[in-house]
């Protein structure tokens, strides 16, 4: 079973740094005084969210029905505004009245929607929302796929690279490797649905 410490150490090993914790204590905290531990503690949650929201990872998708719009309607363009889900990193899909839409850029169609000012704007009093959620709950790490762990640890290594190694060459190499691994992971993740295609960020709406 993968742990936060495992992911951090996988990143640190790419940099030739000193691993945190110890082989016989996988539950070791990141509160020691080493530079590696401090960087992992600082960057872990942020980079996890960055990598999660960059793509429609199937394990991070969540479906909710929003049916309590804000009493104050949008000034124009839409008839309802719903609070942005508290655990959402990125709204992927909104549908209502049997109309599905992905990344619609105009409000001239019935099923259009938009994320704006911490709200989801739509033309219905009830909307079905599918979004990429923040993977920070107890047990969420067990949902991570091997491809995601690989991408996550590599992106974490990129983030910590200059502080630990001061090597711009290694930073560039790791960045290029991350982009390649990310594409490979997307291809595998996208094969997990027959009726839907999980595509990259151009079809997602960021908050």
Image: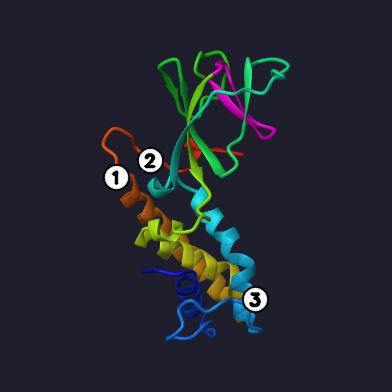
**Residue occupied by mark 1:** 192
Sequence-wise first label, 1 or 3:
3
Residue 15 coordinates in the image, percent (x, y): 52, 79
Q: Quadrant of the N terminus?
A: bottom left
In the image, which disc is placed on residue 61? Answer: none
Q: CA distance from mark 1 to mark 3?
A: 37 Å
- Per the image, label 1 sits on a secondary structure element best described as helix
Q: Which residue is mark 2?
A: 198
Whether tag 1 and tag 2 are in contact, CB under 8 A, the answer is: yes
N-terminal-most mark, 3 or 2: 3
Other-residue count near label 3 (Cα within 10 Å), few / some / many at <14 / 14–19 / ≥20: some
Residue range corresponding to the magenta coloring = 112-125
Q: How is the image coloured?
A: rainbow
| Disc 2 packing (10 Å; few <14; some 14–19; many ≥20) | many
Residue at the image position 29 percent from the left and 45 percent from the top: 192
Q: CA distance from mark 1 to mark 2?
A: 8 Å
Element carrying mark 3: helix
Q: CA distance from mark 3 to mark 2?
A: 35 Å
Does any portion of residue 35 appear in the rendered image?
yes
Q: Say whether residue 206 is left or right of residue 97.
A: right
Report which residue position mark 3 lands on.
Answer: 38
| Whether residue 173 is situated above or below residue 198 in the rendered picture | below
């Amino acid at each position: 079973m993968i742990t936060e410490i495992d992911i951090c150490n996988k990143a640190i090993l790419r940099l030739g740094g000193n691993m945190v914790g110890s082989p016989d204590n996988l539950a070791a905290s990141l509160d020691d005084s080493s530079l590696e531990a401090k960087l992992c503690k600082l960057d872990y949650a942020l980079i996890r969210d960055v990598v999660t929201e960059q793509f429609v990872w199937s394990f991070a998708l969540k479906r909710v029905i929003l049916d309590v719009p804000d009493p104050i309607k949008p000034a124009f363009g839409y008839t309802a505004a719903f609070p942005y889900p508290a655990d959402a990193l990125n709204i992927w899909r909104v549908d209502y009245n049997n109309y599905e839409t992905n990344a619609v850029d105009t409000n001239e169609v019935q099923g259009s929607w938009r994320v704006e000012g911490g709200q989801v704007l739509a033309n219905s009093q009830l909307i079905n929302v599918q979004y990429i959620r923040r993977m920070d709950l107890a047990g969420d790490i067990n949902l991570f796929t091997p491809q995601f762990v690989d991408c996550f640890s590599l992106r974490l290594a990129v983030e910590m690279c200059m502080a630990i190694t001061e090597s711009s060459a290694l930073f560039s190499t790791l960045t290029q490797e991350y982009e390649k691994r990310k594409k490979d992971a997307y291809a595998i993740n996208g094969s997990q649905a027959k009726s839907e295609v999980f595509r990259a960020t151009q079809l997602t709406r960021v908050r």
